[in-house]
Amino acid sequence: QLQLVESGGGLVQPGGSLRLSCAASGFTLDYYAITWFRQAPGKEREGVSCISSSGGSTNYADSVKGRFTVSRDNAKNTVYLQMNSLKPEDTALYYCARNRYDYCAGYMLNMIESWGQGTQVTVSS
């Protein structure tokens, strides 16, 4: 029953916004940091953002700083990624992932315990 489900992706024009959701089931989300990754076809997976279990600490990749905001509502067992000022290079499959612990760790893949299936974000005119 351990599961992470991403939603909220879609097609938007450059400069537009989307809010991605990562809903957890089968575990208590507030015990874990959650990391967002993205991957475009033929490209390496890239860490995007991370939020600690309490929401007190957040990290962002340089490519999204100032445009993306990660947040969480532990009462709803959900983490969000607000994506503003979207660019074509943001086009990718976005994944949320449960860290092994309650803290963020620089997008180290060996710190990831489980993954969602991803939600597609396409930024195009």
Image: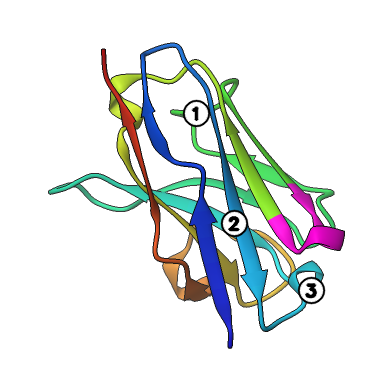
Report x, y in % for residue 2.
Answer: 58, 84
Report x, y in % for residue 116.
Answer: 46, 67
Name the quadrant containing residue 13: top left
- Residue at the spot 80% in from the left edge and 59% down from the top edge: 76
Height in image: 55 above or below 74?
A: above
* Badge 2 amino acid: Cys
- Residue at the spot 43% in from the left edge and 20% down from the top edge: 86
Label 2 sits on residue? 22
* Badge 1 amino acid: Val
Q: Circle 3 sits in a helix, a strand or a loop, which is it?
A: helix
Report x, y in % for residue 34.
Answer: 63, 60
Q: Mark 3: give few (<14), some (14-19) or many (20+) Cα within 10 Å.
A: some
Q: CA distance from mark 1 to mark 3?
A: 26 Å
* Badge 3 amino acid: Tyr
Height in image: 64 above or below 20?
A: above
Report x, y in % for residue 124.
Answer: 27, 19
Return the disc, 2 or 1, that comes first in the chain's sequence: 2
As drawn, is 22 to the left or to the right of 96?
Answer: right
As drawn, is 30 to the left or to the right of 87?
Answer: right
Of circles 3 and 2, the one toward us is 2
